[in-house]
Image (cartoon, rainbow, N blue to C red):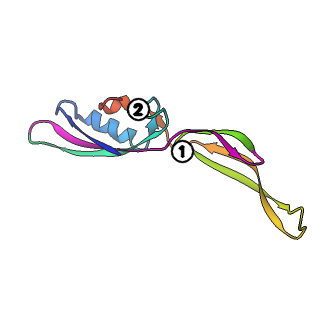
Amino acid sequence: MGETHYLPSETVTDAYKGALYNATGCVNVNPFKGTAALETLFLGACGSQRGNNDWEIRFKFASSPNKTDLSIPGVSDSICKNGWEYLWVRYHDVFDNDDSKLMLKKPYAAYVERVYLATDFANLGIGT
């Protein structure tokens, strides 16, 4: 998803460009444009100045919903994972009860890892 915004020249300073740069690759720490905290990833912005006037800037985002009460049979019935976190499962080998020659993978642990830093998207200057 994306949005185009027109910002005054006095807003698009080197400091503002730096803020866009620093927010790129981060997720929202607060609710943002209808998504819950940690569901929206800022993919970056590009744009140009229109003559001596304002700037036309295109902001790009991706969203992934937060999940609660995920279930991994044999591990947990209540795993919570925020949108851009990574869920992975660790397995160990066990013999099948019906066939002692057959080795199966059985989950025994689930982990949720943070992938992206979170930041305040209010600093983008396009509303929340």
Magenta span of residues: 52-75
Q: Pick whichever of labels 1 and 2 is earlier in the sequence.
A: 2
Which of labels 1 and 2 is toward the front? 2
Q: Is residue 125 magenta?
A: no
Q: Type of residue at label 1?
A: Val
Q: Residue 115 has which mark? A: 1
Crowd tier of the residue under label 1, counting other residues whose Cα lies within 10 Å: few below 14, some 14–19, many 20 or above:
few
- Is 65 left, or right, of 89 in this rendering? left
Quadrant of the drawing holding the C terminus: top left
Q: Please tell me whether mark 1 sits on a helix, a strand or a loop.
A: loop
Q: Which residue is mark 2?
A: 32
What residue lies at 45% left-to-right and 29% top-to-bottom?
Answer: 30
**Real-space CA distance between mark 1 and mark 2, rounded to the nearest whole angstrom:** 19 Å
Residue drawn at point x = 25 percent, y = 36 percent = 14
Residue toward you, 110 or 18: 110
Q: Specify the principal SS of the magenta part.
A: strand
Where does the image place residue 17, in percent across and percent down from the top left? 28, 38
Q: Amino acid at mark 2?
A: Phe
In the image, is 35 to the left or to the right of 114?
Answer: left
